[in-house]
Amino acid sequence: MEDEILICDVTDGIARLVMNRPAKLNALSDAMLTAPLTALRDDQDVRVTILTGAGKAFRAGHDLKEMQTGHAAPDGGAAYFNDLFARCGALMQLIPSSPQPVIAEVHAIATAAGCQLRHSCCRRWHALWRKRRQYHAQSGV
């Protein structure tokens, strides 16, 4: 269970998706972008989806270590980043187009792409102590 990057539990028509990379603050990795999020769209038993994160973060932004690897390509990462951001955009558009409502259960900090993911959901529930940050400019992304 700890090796799964996305844990899904469906009970009584409620799907609970837990982003499960707590050691990396649930950073958006290449593997996370290819996780089977589309499977719930076609499940007629699912009436609502709750999206949350494991550990002390709802979701950090992109996995910056993976992004640094993309920079090392001969083209300076142009192809890698075009592909990465196209897939990220597709994920962010997949959520609001879902036939079931998707609720973001934000229990802790959400930064950069985590904020975008949170805003993609049709409803957001925040713990009182949550933090939201946009660090794009500070990190040079």
Image (spheres, helix red, strand yellow):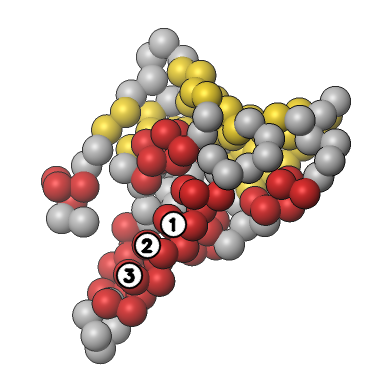
Label disc, if present, on residue 38 of the rendered structure: none
- Using the image as rendered, state which of residue 90 and residue 70 is in the foreground: 90
Label disc, if present, on residue 85 of the rendered structure: 2
Categorize mark 2 by other alpha carbons within 10 Å: few (<14), some (14-19), many (20+): few
- Using the image as rendered, state which of residue 120 and residue 62 is in the foreground: 120
Q: Is residue 30 left or right of residue 15?
A: left
Q: Is residue 31 above or below residue 58?
A: below
Q: Is residue 36 left or right of residue 92?
A: right
- The CA span between labels 1 and 2 is 5 Å
Q: Which quadrant would the C terminus be assigned to in this image?
A: bottom left
- Using the image as rendered, state which of residue 85 and residue 96 is in the foreground: 96
Q: Amino acid at mark 2?
A: Phe
- The CA span between labels 2 and 3 is 6 Å
Residue 34 pos. (x, y %): 58, 62
- The residue positioned 37% from the left and 36% from the top of the image is 115
- The residue positioned 85% from the left and 25% from the top of the image is 12
**Residue 24 at least partly seen:** no
Q: Amino acid at mark 3?
A: Phe
Q: Is residue 4 left or right of residue 133?
A: right
Residue 82 pos. (x, y %): 34, 71
Q: Amino acid at mark 1?
A: Cys
- The residue positioned 40% from the left and 71% from the top of the image is 83
Categorize mark 1 by other alpha carbons within 10 Å: few (<14), some (14-19), many (20+): many
- The residue positioned 52% from the left and 24% from the top of the image is 123
